[in-house]
Image (cartoon, grey):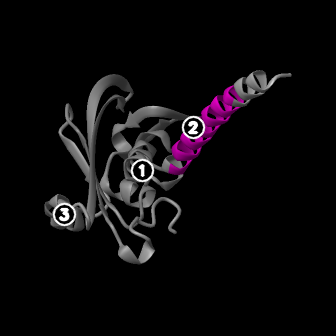
Amino acid sequence: MSYFEAGFELGIWLIRLAFVIVIALLVALSVSSHNNREINIKSIEGDVILKRLFYSNDCFAYSDLRPYPGVVDAERFNDETIKKCLDGDYYVKAELVGSGISAYNNKAAFEEQIGFCKYENKYYCYKKEMYVALMDKGILRNDIMKMELVVPIDIKYGGYSKGLLGF
């Protein structure tokens, strides 16, 4: 092998090495940016809390011999049921638009706290509107359920509410 061939081979290996280093740096940068970002779970927590209203047998889900998740029982749509169902450090209002019925887990606290939703570092507010099937006196009909959730963000617990499990 002549000096020219050895120099040419060395040049090709330097280009390959530079290419591998650039790829390794890009991979390391993408992994570190993924690990260092903040993940906001507040909207997921809000959605889970509100979906519990009509998917849980303890809440508004219609049941005869078995529960029917997604079908709201008009007779169970009241403050007592929602208090037993959603007893946490958050305040919920559920309203059946077509029937004009509303239910709160704590009406006084909800109406007091809803005005603070503009303070994003202190309160998290979530609204959702869904089409539901409503069982009213043996008749199944369609309705719209509007749900509002107010979660006070407690700094003692790392900036999140205690949530569904209480911690």
The residue at the point 72 percent across, 28 percent down is: 7
- Circles 3, 2 touching at the beta carbon (< 8 Å): no
Is disc 1 surrounded by few (<14), some (14 to 19) or many (20+) residues within 10 Å? some
Q: Nearer the viewer, residue 126 or 100?
A: 126
Q: Name the residue under label 2.
A: 22
Q: Residue furthest right?
A: 1
Where 142 sits versus 41, above or below?
above
**What secondary structure is found at the residue carrying circle 1?**
helix
Where 89 sits versus 104, above or below?
below
Q: Image quarter for residue 12?
A: top right
> For the residue marked with disc 2, what is the amino acid?
Val
| 2 or 1: tag closer to the N-terminus | 2
Is disc 2 surrounded by few (<14), some (14 to 19) or many (20+) residues within 10 Å? few
Which disc is residue 157 wearing?
none
| 3 or 2: tag closer to the N-terminus | 2
* Closer mark to the observer between disc 2 and disc 1: 2
Magenta run includes residue 10? no
Magenta run includes residue 29? yes
Q: What stretch is highlighted in magenta?
A: 11-32
* Closer mark to the observer between disc 1 and disc 3: 3
Q: Which quadrant of the rendered structure holds the N terminus?
A: top right
The residue at the point 61 percent across, 36 percent down is: 18
Q: Where is residue 58 in the image (x, y as percent from the top left)?
A: 49, 50
The residue at the point 20 percent across, 31 percent down is: 98
Q: Image quarter for residue 135?
A: top left
Which disc is residue 49 wearing?
1
Q: Image quarter for residue 53?
A: top left
**What secondary structure is found at the residue carrying circle 3?**
loop
Left or right of 33 on screen, residue 154: left
Label 1, label 3: how far apart the Cα atoms are? 21 Å
> For the residue marked with disc 1, what is the amino acid?
Ile
